[in-house]
Amino acid sequence: EKRKKKELINKVHLNILITSSSKKVPLIMSCISAAKKINKDIKIISGDINKNSISKYVSNSFWKMPITKDMNFQLILEGCLKRNIKLIIPTRDQELLFWSKYKNKFKKNGINVSISPIKTIKICNDKYLFSKFGEKNNLPLINSSLQINEINNRYYVVKERYGSGSNLISLKLSKKNAIEYAKKIKSPIYQPFINGKEISVDAWFDKKSKLIGLSLRERFIVKSGESQITKTFRNNIIERKIKKVFSHFKFCGPVVFQAIVVKNNVHIIECNPRFGGATTASINIGLDIFYWTIAESLGISSDEFKFLRNNIESTQIRVPQDIYRYDNNI
């Protein structure tokens, strides 16, 4: 039966769309590598609203996409069908609600979207709701408030309430400076500043929300919210605590937690239910999330997936890299 399934997969003409591809070259290259393990004829299409996106030079083809808004749903669907896209991998916080909202409509047209349910997306995209969800379920999610007086701490963090707050975040502020900085942000929230080890948790869940694997990594240097130097590590106590938190959410596909750890006490800052910029560090030690995503979309049961973690830890150093092409197509 497995042999027949493999033969069937080898005959599938599958195109994969990576949305908001921008300059996410390592992510695209990792997806290409995973696809080749399944079927060398699988094509990776990078999609972005910017026609000059750098990703167009590393993927098999490029699609200048419409903005992911309700009014463009039909246009995007038709564009996917025209390009024979069978799997969509979203990568940007601001588009997750769109893809989750229309996930079933894409499915009816033979297109899988690697995305969690809309209820989960709404909680994770709103840091205030995320904090209140943790409070309600007695989870170690960092306290967030719309009013600074509701938090009693020496230093504060001020950030944007919705989506990724990395571009509008200020750390270790006095109460006075926090109030002033908040005036520069559209929808500010306040959090206590906690001094500890900054970590990310990469994880992948199957379509039934079963956790297949997770990987911890410490973030040593962070720029614009993305890890520039990050190293994988193991800690059974932290992993157990993270798994307990995971059990209260309904996730599907990729997830990234950001957290601060102080003596094995975990303070979860936020959740990004998508592939992260430095998730490739976890892929490098065996968390084969692109392979699992593609394989599951082709009908392979997640019962066949196993997280075979490397015993040697991996340090990822993200640096710009030159790419040369010798043709007349640019």
Image: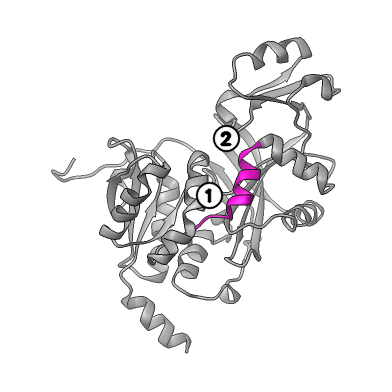
Measuring from the top left, give residue 291's x and y in whole percent.
48, 64
Q: Residue at x 63, y 57 (%)?
A: 251
Q: Is residue 115 magenta?
A: yes
Q: On the picture, is 189 further left or further right than 275?
A: right
Q: Is residue 14 magenta?
A: no
Measuring from the top left, give residue 70's x and y in whole percent.
42, 44
Q: Using the image, determine if residue 257 lies above or below residue 194.
A: below
Characterize the magenta stretch by its predominant secondary structure. Answer: helix
The disc label shown at residue 164, or none? 2
Q: On the picture, is 148 further left or further right than 209?
A: right
Residue 145 sits in quarter: top right
Q: Specify whether residue 98 is in view.
A: yes
- Amino acid at circle 1: Phe
The disc label shown at residue 275, or none? 1
- Amino acid at circle 2: Ser
- Check the picture and name the quadrant holding the C terminus: top left
Q: Residue at x 28, y 35 (%)?
A: 52
Q: Earlier in the sequence, mark 1 or mark 2?
A: 2
Measuring from the top left, give residue 321's x and y in whole percent.
38, 38
Boundaries of the magenta span: 114-126
Label 1 vs label 2: CA separation?
A: 13 Å
Residue 127 sits in quarter: top right
Q: Secondary structure at mark 1?
A: loop
